Amino acid sequence: MYNSRKKTFAFKLISLIMIAFIAVITCDNQPIYLYIGYITMMGITILNMAFNKKINKIKIRAPMLLLVVFGCFCALSGAWAWDPALVQSNQVVILAGVSMIVIMGNYFIEENSPEIILLTILLSGLVLSFYVVISYGGLSAFYDIASKGEDRLGSEIKNVNSIGMSCAYSSVILCYYAIYKKQRLCWIIMILPTIVLLSTASRKAILMLLLGCFLLVILRPGQERGYGKYLKIIIGLIILICIVYAVLQLPLLSNVSERLEMAFSTLTGDVRHADGSSITRKRMIEVGLEQFTKTPFIGIGLNNSSILNFNQLRFAAYSHNDYVDLLVNGGAIGFGLYYGTIFILLRRHIVKIKHNIDDVCKISFVLMIMLLFANMAAVTYYGGLTTYVLILLWVVVAYA
């Protein structure tokens, strides 16, 4: 009994520390906070495993073997990189992230507690939402500034798209608890991260929020089969479109509406009404794919896409597309190692969902789909939040 209490206390301790540190790393862009968070959490996980005599159970299990090889490949890419110094600046983050996935993944697999990781991601978005609102002087002042629609709020804290995606994950997880676990209070809690998300005017975050909530409705238990199910999907889509259109007319969302219209103009080729950001991103994708044809196997080295973009576009930045950035930096080998891991996790999720094994698998699957779609407009393979999502995905399917 005493040992059981000690184990429970240690498990709660590491869970609370995880929540605290992910809150810190999502509230600041400085790499030092990322390193401190990774090292602290790995250290406490190892101590906890040693305390419970499970230290010998750390294994590199499939599909994480591919991810470990990917981390090593990224580190070795300095040998052929255009600028080896740029490789060094990111390889520590990637290797630390891979190490944390392996160590903490093993720990939570042994504990069979994927929901702790899920709650960590949820709480990180909530903490970040509070942090943003407080930074602008409280809810009333925040709403007044946001209603003017002049600026994208949150840029003083960190990248507004990162804030938006963190809030999107948090809102979708709250939606999951409201629908699947009947926790009605979650609908009210969901308001805060959703408002902060909208105030950032992050187009991909808004679309991912809608996509995530829609997928949760589609996958929820007790759904009809056959034509009735598809009819409900169509009706649901029509209602969703009407609601989104009505909401976009609010003063708070004037900036969002304008940015979505400009993004649509870029997709349709209407350059006159497209914004410069979307046009630049489109050009970076074109330049990146062209470079991939020249260095198709091993790429130009980790983090070196910024050199390519500067040489071609006079704009020193990564490619703003995870798929293109990996193809440019790591070639087909780097791309295959990283997304090979994602593909295996995706396949195992689909198997579990078909057999309706558990609901946690469904929210995990939804977060994975959100990540894959968001990656078309962001580079996330070395991001802190992505690390936690990958731990969740691995723990959920560990016994599939």
Image: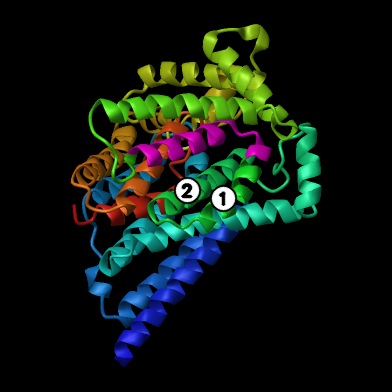
Q: Can residue 29 be seen in this view?
A: no
Residue 342 place in picture, x, y as percent: 31, 41
Magenta segment: 198-218
41 or 151: which is nearer to us? 151
Q: In this view, does 342 lie above or below 320?
A: below
Residues at marks 2 and 1, CA–CA distance in whole angstroms: 7 Å
**Relative to residue 361, is residue 36 drawn left or right?**
right
Identify the residue shown where x is 50% and y is 70%: 17
Identify the residue shown where x is 57% and y is 30%: 243
Check disc 2 and give the amino acid type.
Cys
Residue 41 place in picture, x, y as percent: 45, 67
Secondary structure beneath label 1: loop
Q: Can residue 373 be seen in this view?
A: yes
Identify the residue shown where x is 55% and y is 23%: 309
Identify the residue shown where x is 44% and y is 54%: 177
Task: Give the quadrant of residue 310.
Answer: top right
Q: Do callouts 2 and 1 mark residues in contact (Cβ within 8 Å)?
A: yes
113 or 211: which is nearer to us? 211
Check disc 1 and give the amino acid type.
Met
Residue 83 place in picture, x, y as percent: 50, 35
Q: In this view, does 242 lie above or below 216?
A: above
In the rendered image, residue 341 lying in the magenta stretch gets the answer: no
Task: Give the quadrant of residue 182.
Answer: bottom left
Say which label, 2 or 1, has the lower sequence index: 2
Q: Residue under circle 2?
A: 175
Q: Residue under circle 1?
A: 190
